[in-house]
Image (spheres, coloured by chain):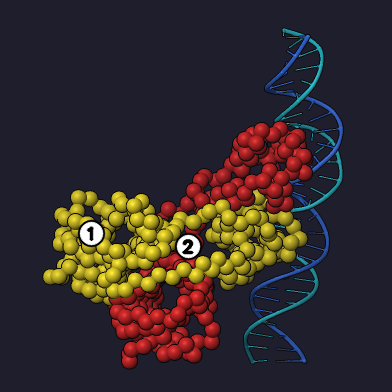
Chain colours: A red, B yellow, C blue, D cyan
Amino acid sequence: MTDQQDIYPSMTISTDQSSENIAPIKLGERLKEIRRGLGLTLEEASQKTGLARSTLSKIENEQISPTFQAMQKLTSGLDINIPQLFATPKKVNTTGRRDITRNELGKAHPTSTYEHELLATQLSNKKMMPFKSLVRARSFDDYSDWIRHDGEEFLLVIKGEITFFSEYYEPVNLSEGDSVYYDANMGHMLASVSEDDALILWVTAS
Amino acid sequence: MTDQQDIYPSMTISTDQSSENIAPIKLGERLKEIRRGLGLTLEEASQKTGLARSTLSKIENEQISPTFQAMQKLTSGLDINIPQLFATPKKVNTTGRRDITRNELGKAHPTSTYEHELLATQLSNKKMMPFKSLVRARSFDDYSDWIRHDGEEFLLVIKGEITFFSEYYEPVNLSEGDSVYYDANMGHMLASVSEDDALILWVTAS
DNA sequence: AACAAATGTTTCCTATAGTGAATTTATTTA
DNA sequence: TAAATAAATTCACTATAGGAAACATTTGTT
């Protein structure tokens, strides 16, 4: 699945762990709060960070935009967390999106071991990526190696029966209606047990 | 669904964004990975970020230390978040969790309009919450108001037929195999059309 | 191979970040 | 209150980031 993600925008998952997407960040203000919170003067902060007193002053007053180097000195010197200093400027607050995919009318995406049908491909930047898959593989050997990628995955058997192989567990058979939720960093793969290819629903999030 | 989430740890969804990683940083290297991962050339990245191609090249090769301004352009232009920039992608937190739910053996959770069956309840702090639901409601009037909550939702009709009502769209009928992906902030609700209660799979992420 | 097209790097210049010293502003103390 | 001291800001300068274009390198094509 992973290899072609770039080509399919609808396959992109918005990782969106962005903190409270607060306004266009007032880094200076923030820094001042932090320094004050630590009860430090500019001079003391200067000592700790190795940045000139004047530089700190300018940063706090938004007169200059510190370099990454400077920020590293700041964060290590004052022992603060870089990600916190940032805020993603644009809050995408998506609301009201909707995408219906009729049965069998998803976007086909065949591989050697699966016949994927991508769902909700009209929407990009989703938190989840849902798709149905026909499991063509019949045994472990149909794969060259474990499948492994970021995020978590949920799968539900819609039709047929499969064996679910995973790196840290014994293989287990899943029948219609059975489901499994797992960490996708753990190697995993599927094989159909039933005569016909099994049909499953897959949802990924990262 | 929302009202009782606190009581059920397995219903909690990990919003993530925990502080985690300490600044390691080969920023340039990391940026290059990200850009490449997005399948962008320097020129394309330049267009998206508003930073000169040469500047991007220098940043990637650690020849300069970008200013905060530049970094903001980077993160908003490439739609990446800061943790992503600072996280070493190597740290595979292979938790190796796995949770199988056999057909009809999920955790029952009945309401007036739905008969929910929670799946993967052994795991807490998941990115997604999957559950099957029998749709008992037969019409719009069975609800007092729109259902509305944070996150995004994916639903697939397993059995029967339903009408999907939503705040900004006309009602639409969904049959077996049909699915819909929508923003859960948008008011939504379901009613069974079929004689028997319809069975659906639901996955939520926020 | 020879060429063309694209992608990436380096150069050279301007704009701006960073610094120590001078200046101003706040705070303390007599 | 003013003087003394501490703290923060501004000044004048140097160092470095950012941009346009030249240059180099890679990739694809005939």
- Residue C25 placement: quadrant: top right
Of tags 1 and 2, the one toward the viewer is 1
Gap between marks 1 and 2 measured at Cα: 32 Å
SS class, disc 1: strand
Query: Vertical placement of B58 versus B5: above or below?
Result: below
Q: Do labels 1 and 2 share a chain?
A: no
Label 1 marks which chain's residue?
A: B
Residue B198, position as x, y percentages in the image: 20, 69
Q: In the depicted view, which residue is nearer to us: A157 or B163?
A: A157
Label 2 marks which chain's residue?
A: A
Relative horizontal placement of residue B72, taking residue B107 as reference (left or right): right
Q: In the depicted view, which residue is nearer to us: A62 or A206?
A: A206
SS class, disc 2: loop
Residue A4, position as x, y percentages in the image: 51, 77
- Residue B49 placement: quadrant: bottom right
Taking the spot 55% from the left edge, 46% from the top edge, the residue there is A24
Instruction: Say which quadrant the N terminus of chain B sits in.
Output: bottom left
Residue A178, position as x, y percentages in the image: 32, 75
What residue did someone put label 1 on? B110
Amino acid at the residue labelled 2 = Ser
Query: Vertical placement of C30 versus B126: above or below?
Result: above
Taking the spot 46% from the left edge, 55% from the top edge, the residue there is B15
* Label 1: few (<14), some (14–19) or many (≥20) C-alpha neighbours in 10 Å: few
Viewer can see residue B53:
no
What residue did someone put label 2 on? A14
